[in-house]
Amino acid sequence: QKEVEQNSGPLSVPEGAIASLNCTYSDRGSQSFFWYRQYSGKSPELIMFIYSNGDKEDGRFTAQLNKASQYVSLLIRDSQPSDSATYLCAVRGGGADGLTFGKGTHLIIQP
Amino acid sequence: EAGVAQSPRYKIIEKRQSVAFWCNPISGHATLYWYQQILGQGPKLLIQFQNNGVVDDSQLPKDRFSAERLKGVDSTLKIQPAKLEDSAVYLCASSLVRGTDWSGGEQFFGPGTRLTVL
């Protein structure tokens, strides 16, 4: 049974600071990792994905992957109030296409 | 490019009734997924289609849930009979291709159908 663990929060970060969101996964066969943002009452929207160990940057977002530690993180630089949402970590791999999601971390950016 | 379409957006039914949800994926997307998201949880995969064939339905409660994608485009998910614990948002997602372990297959979600079972 694949498991994806996230701290549910809420995580409160001042505006302009770096928000750091973390995720661990249980299945060592997992190969691709996704971060989705979900505003209250809305559907998840893809922020970015990462497949290789190391960092991947896209604008204010950086995803970090450490397969040895089974750990994925998302950094949001220069946090804005509009970044306040639930961030879902999702994992795919081991021959399956469907994503296994964590419960999400509720992020609050304080103006 | 139009996104994933779903209907209805909201549905309220009594337990033991039946209900059906409809999804139309992004044009050209061969892979279609149905997820169930209970309040406070992440989405849980129910079923995956590749064109009109089922790839994975291991987490679909087959005694009450069924899904089809007859022409390889739009899809319906049915619950019969509904239980209180089926109250959730049902999300449809699509992807252009099946992802490999290394690339591709990014999934895009529709707005969801919020089901309340009384």
Image (tube, coloured by chain):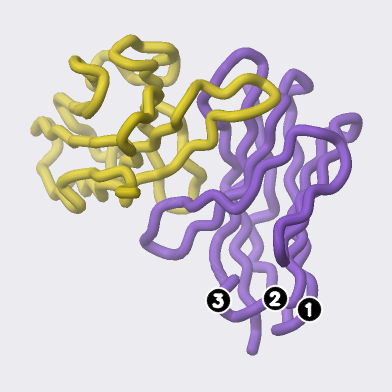
Chain colours: A purple, B yellow
CB within 8 Å, label 1 to label 2: yes
Looking at the image, residue A57 sits to the left or right of residue A98; the answer is: right
Residue A84 — which label? none
Q: Earlier in the sequence, mark 1 or mark 2?
A: 1
Which secondary structure, mark 2?
loop
Counting from the top left corner in percent of width and height, residue A73 is at: 77, 50
Task: Give the Cα separation between the discs numbered 2 and 3.
Answer: 8 Å
Marks 1 and 2, how far apart at CA: 6 Å
For residue A92, above or below residue B90: above
For label 3, the residue is: A82
Residue assigned mark 2: A79
Give SS at disc 1. Answer: loop
Question: Would residue B79 be visible to someone looking at this image?
Answer: yes
Q: Residue at x 73, y 45 (%)?
A: A23
Along the line of sight, which residue is nearer the eye, A97 or B21? A97
Give the left or right position of residue B102, taking residue B41 as reference. Answer: right
Tag 2 subunit: A
In the rendered structure, the answer to whether residue A30 lies left or right of residue B15 reads right
Q: Which residue in the structure is indicated by mark 1?
A: A17
Reply above or below: A75 against B114. below
Going from the N terminus, do you reach mark 1 or mark 3 first? Answer: 1
Q: Amino acid at mark 3?
A: Ser
Disc 1: CA contacts within 10 A as few (<14), some (14-19) or many (>=20): some
User: Residue B20, located in which quarter of the rendered image?
Assistant: top left
Question: Callout 2, which amino acid?
Answer: Ser
